[in-house]
Amino acid sequence: MAPFPTFPKELEIFADRSKLGERLKGDNPAKIHELVTQDLLRSDPELQRLLGQKPLERIEALLSQGYGEPVLRDIVSGPLDADKLRDSYYCGVKYGIYDLQQLHRELLDFPDPPSGARHLAITHDGVHALEQFVLAKHYLTAQVYTHRVRLITDNMVVRSIVLGVDDDEIDDMRNLYSYDGEEKFVKNYGGWDDARFMLTFGDEKLKGKYCNEMVLRLAERRLLKQVFLGKLTGLPRSCREAVESITKPKNRARRRALEQSLADIVQTAGVRLTTDLVDPSKFVIVNSYKGKAVREMSRNDEGPILVRRDNDAPTTFENESDLFRSLSGEPTEARFAVYAPVEYENPTQRRDLHKTLRDPILKALEEFGNAE
């Protein structure tokens, strides 16, 4: 059974670091969800039977301090890693199609002369297929990753977890996300999938809990609505810096204060928050996000994509691609959104609601920034 899709932020928030000791020290770059994956690999008898102990140890090393061959790390986590190729190909966004077979044919690994370590690169003949791939990532981000409904549903799932642990104090939820590195946690975590999550926390016996209502809203497609959206530069100057980083785990208290303030603003404007629970502000969610520039996607966080022509020294994709040299390196502008449990029946009512709330929300944001 596959574990319920990992939400790294929540594992980071609720992990018991006092019990993880050396696993989070030194040059180990692993994040909590990667530690969980290591434990699952180490403890799953079926994986051990199918893959064998040595291959599993090599995979585990890729998720911790890295394996001796950088090319293997590049396949797991790099600008051309398997996840990026898969997502871009199988989401099938209309303008995000590229020649996957051609890209595979032109991939190669080559030794770095000083160290002899092997790195992942692409031949010069694969540059055009790589241009298609990077553009596919751009359209995937625009049409899938930052789509309004995708952002709302993701935030609702995450909020259901936080409410289940912090407010409802549901033992099953706390045990599922309070990682401590113990065998008991790993065994429990490996027994969950998305169906069990939805059935357990959407069960009638949890009626009246914040987590339960949020899960039921997801199951019944009663999603929160976006009641405000604005570019960061369109917000009051006093709040821009605070708002841009508002979703980081370290800013949980400030985020909560802002959401409480905005819930009051919405209700004062005569807009009902459609929940009968004690504190409807817990269902108001603020979100700040932005996309990467197309040229930035050709580098990614892990480093540049390398291109090699015959036996020449490798160069970067940005240097080899005429198309990407011509594109601006400016990232898309950061945006700030507010989601809330409100209702409207048609686009006209939606536009009226947005118009009603815009100025009061902007004023609240200005006051929030000045208070900072």
Image (tube, grey):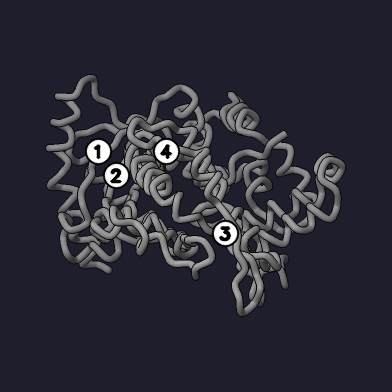
Q: Are marks 2 and 3 in contact (CB under 8 Å)?
A: no
Residue 227: mark in rendering? 1
2 vs 3, front mark: 3
Say few, some or many: other residues with alpha carbon within 10 Å of mark 2 (under 14 / 14 to 19 / 20 or more).
Answer: many
Task: Please state the horizontal and vertical placement of residue 144, each as a whole percent of the image.
Answer: 38, 37
For label 2, the residue is 338
The Cα atoms of the two marked residues, 2 and 1, are separated by: 6 Å
Element at badge 2?
Answer: strand
How many neighbours does mark 4 have within 10 angstroms: few (below 14), some (14-19), or many (20 or more)? many
Asked whether the residues under the numbered discs 2 and 1 touch, taking CB atoms below 8 Å apart as contact, a structural biologist would say yes
> N-terminal of the two: label 1 or label 3?
3
Residue 352 coordinates in the image, percent (x, y): 13, 31
Q: Residue at x 19, y 24 (%)?
A: 347
Q: Position of 1 compared to 303: left or right?
A: right
Indicate the secondary structure of the residue bearing disc 4.
loop
Q: Which mark is residue 120?
A: 3
Q: Label 2 is placed on what type of residue? A: Val
Residue occupied by mark 4? 98
